[in-house]
Image: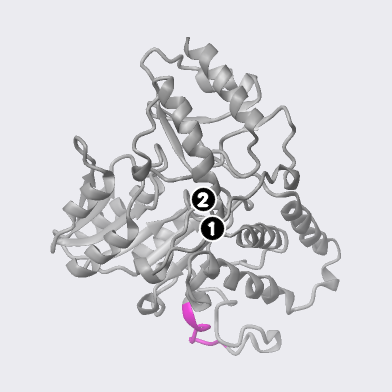
């Protein structure tokens, strides 16, 4: 598959409500809503002021518009997309539809996000499968470590595209190929990359993929989506709700109970998916990302972070080899002498980053200005002196 052509995107701060004296470098914690998304959500919420004006069709219109946009984010077909309120909901759906046997291995990464650990611990308890935690050793990359751990007794690999603590990058195409060769299922959590890094499910071929909407998709909290591969679309959903059933749009016949589901992955949609406020806001955010182009976002953030990584390295804060980290994500290794309240000190100066373990997590976006970066580096010099 050929690499898409890319163009660097100019600063987009005018689309966000971020004051000039705020350096927000913390998208990995929560992405800001574009102002247009907030306005769309407000218009959607206002429909509830006069519920008698809401036609039955509106229970389906927002999801019908949004489902193909979410599919486009990952190069998927619309029939593979389901609406979920959280990563844990999507992973629980995946777990319910994976058959593991006693002694099979579930491979997880060291320091993986808790929601993507607890789900698999419970599945291991239920099935007798065994959790194996993978870490990199020496000069080995995390991708190399994970690839080397996939064997014929591996039943499931559950991983992100980038690790949430330090941005360590996983070669999903290679992992997907190794999983298929070993007969293992692959479940992905793309919350820390979807919208900022290209991921094509046609190349990776995961069994399930889930992403929350409130980080790099710049959407509202409690939004997200699940992708199910074609051979995983006939499974059992977590809920038995009315709107995912065949014939649901005909409200006059809802008591003609149907066992058959709507086609594709729609059977996995959460209950009350027709959220009149959140879905229009998410749609506006996703449409903005698609308008920018994910390949262009990735190229722009990579260019921006390359310079920032160099500046951090000169200060003795290693971010690791560029090839081994997400292009949108910097995890700077802090010296032991770093103050424990470093992020609080920076926050007091309207500079927002996060700390995960012994790393300072720095995640800017298209709204980040050169002034933001200069203020951050200057403050870092003072507080680490």
Is the residue under label 2 in contact with that under label 1 (CB below 8 Å)?
A: yes
Q: Position of residue 13 (x, y in %)?
A: 71, 42
Tell me which label, 1 or 2, sits earlier in the chain: 1
- Residue wearing tag 2: 299
- In the picture, the disc for residue 6 is 1
| Residue 146 horizontal side relative to residue 353, left or right | left
| Residue 372 horizontal side relative to residue 54, left or right | left
- In the picture, the disc for residue 72 is none
Instruction: Sort mark 1 into few (<14), some (14-19) or many (20+) by Cα contacts within 10 Å.
Output: some
Q: Which residues are magenta?
A: 257-264
Quarter of the rendering containing residue 43: bottom right
Residue 328 vertical placement versus 66 (above, below): above
Principal secondary structure, stretch drawn in magenta: loop
Residue closest to the eye, 229 or 361 = 361
258 is within the stretch colored magenta: yes
Is residue 368 visible to the viewer in this orientation of the structure? yes
* Helix, strand or loop at mark 1: loop
Q: CA distance from mark 1 to mark 2?
A: 7 Å
Quarter of the rendering containing residue 153: bottom left
């Amino acid at each position: 598959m050929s690499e898409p052509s890319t163009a660097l995107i100019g600063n987009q701060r005018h689309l966000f409500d971020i004051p000039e004296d705020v350096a927000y470098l913390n998208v990995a914690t929560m992405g800001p809503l574009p102002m247009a998304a907030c306005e769309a959500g407000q218009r959607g919420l206002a429909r509830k002021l006069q519920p008698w004006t809401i036609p039955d069709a509106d229970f389906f219109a927002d999801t019908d518009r949004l489902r193909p946009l979410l599919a486009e984010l990952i190069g998927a077909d619309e029939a593979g997309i389901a609406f979920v309120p959280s990563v844990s909901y999507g992973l629980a759906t995946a777990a319910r539809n994976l058959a593991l046997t006693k002694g099979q291995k579930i491979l997880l990464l060291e320091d993986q996000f808790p929601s993507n650990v607890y789900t698999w611990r419970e599945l291991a308890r239920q099935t007798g499968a065994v959790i194996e935690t993978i870490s990199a050793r020496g000069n080995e990359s995390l991708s190399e470590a994970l690839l080397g751990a996939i064997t014929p007794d591996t039943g499931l690999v559950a991983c992100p595209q980038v690790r949430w603590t330090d941005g360590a990058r996983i070669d999903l195409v290679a992992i997907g190929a190794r999983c298929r060769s070993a007969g293992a299922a692959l479940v992905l959590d793309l919350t820390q990359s979807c919208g900022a890094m290209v991921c094509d499910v046609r190349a990776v071929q995961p069994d399930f993929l889930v992403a929350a909407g409130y980080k790099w998709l710049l959407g509202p909290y409690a939004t997200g989506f699940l992708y199910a591969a074609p051979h995983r679309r006939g499974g059992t959903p977590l809920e038995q709700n009315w709107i995912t059933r065949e014939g649901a749009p005909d409200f006059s016949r809802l008591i003609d109970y149907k066992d058959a589901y709507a086609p594709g992955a729609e059977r996995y949609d959460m209950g009350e998916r027709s959220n009149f406020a959140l879905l229009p806001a998410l749609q506006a955010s996703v449409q903005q990302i698609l308008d920018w182009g994910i390949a262009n976002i990735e190229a722009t953030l990579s260019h921006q972070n390359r310079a920032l990584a160099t500046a951090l390295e000169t200060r003795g804060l290693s971010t690791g080899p560029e090839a081994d980290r997400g292009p949108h994500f910097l995890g700077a290794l802090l010296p032991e002498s770093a103050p424990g309240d470093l992020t609080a000190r920076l926050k007091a100066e309207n500079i927002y980053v996060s700390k995960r373990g012994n790393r300072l997590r720095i995640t800017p976006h298209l709204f980040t200005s050169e002034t933001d970066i200069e203020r951050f580096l200057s403050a870092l010099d003072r507080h680490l002196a």
